[in-house]
Image (cartoon, rainbow, N blue to C red):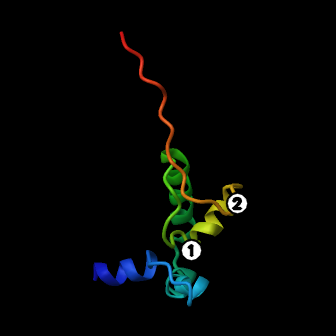
Amino acid sequence: TSAEIERVFFPKPNAKLGDAIWDAGRILCEGCPARNSCLADVMEDEADTGAARYGYRGGKTPDERYALAGEGKQAPRTRTLPPRTHS
């Protein structure tokens, strides 16, 4: 169900569990044949849109994807739009 998918791939932070909140996602993604293409897609999407890295996607946690992007562990980013010009 969508609630189960949300719980596995987009869990709520839990200080008691720490990184263990990602265990179910790791198990499901580990043998997935689409894992590499999924990771490439999410990395491209996050870079193109400036979206914050969220959820377990492409077999990686948000922090792991920040590291792959060379950004280190960060708080969510916001998009900066160019200034409006009036004609």
Q: Which mark is residue 81?
A: none
Choose between 33 and 67: the one closer to the eye. 67
Residue located farthest toward the left when viewing the structure as drawn: 1
Counting every numbered tag in the picture gives 2
Specify the quadrant of the image occupied by residue 86. Answer: top left
- Image coords of residue 42 (percent x, y): 51, 59
Looking at the rendered image, the quarter that the C terminus falls into is top left
Q: Are marks 2 and 1 in contact (CB under 8 Å)?
A: no
The image shows residue 84, relative to residue 34, as above or below, that is: above
- Image coords of residue 2 (percent x, y): 29, 78
Q: Nearer the viewer, mark 2 or mark 1?
A: 2
Residue at label 2?
72
Label 1 residue SS: loop
The residue carrying pointer 2 sits among few (fewer than 14), some (14 to 19) or many (20 or more) residues within 10 Å by Cα, namely: few
Say which label, 2 or 1, has the lower sequence index.
Answer: 1
Dot 2 amino acid type: Gly
Residue located farthest toward the front when viewing the structure as drawn: 15
Label 2 residue SS: loop
CA gap between label 2 and label 1 equals 17 Å
Choose between 56 and 86: the one closer to the eye. 86
Q: Is residue 12 left or right of residue 73?
A: left
Choose between 62 and 44: the one closer to the eye. 62
The image shows residue 45, relative to residue 2, as above or below, that is: above
Residue at label 1?
59
Specify the quadrant of the image occupied by residue 1. Answer: bottom left
Residue sitting at 56 percent across and 89 percent down?
A: 17
Dot 1 amino acid type: Gly
- Image coords of residue 38 (percent x, y): 51, 65
Residue sitting at 51 percent across and 69 percent down?
A: 57
- Image coords of residue 18 (percent x, y): 59, 84
Residue sitting at 71 percent across and 55 percent down?
A: 70
The residue carrying pointer 1 sits among few (fewer than 14), some (14 to 19) or many (20 or more) residues within 10 Å by Cα, namely: many
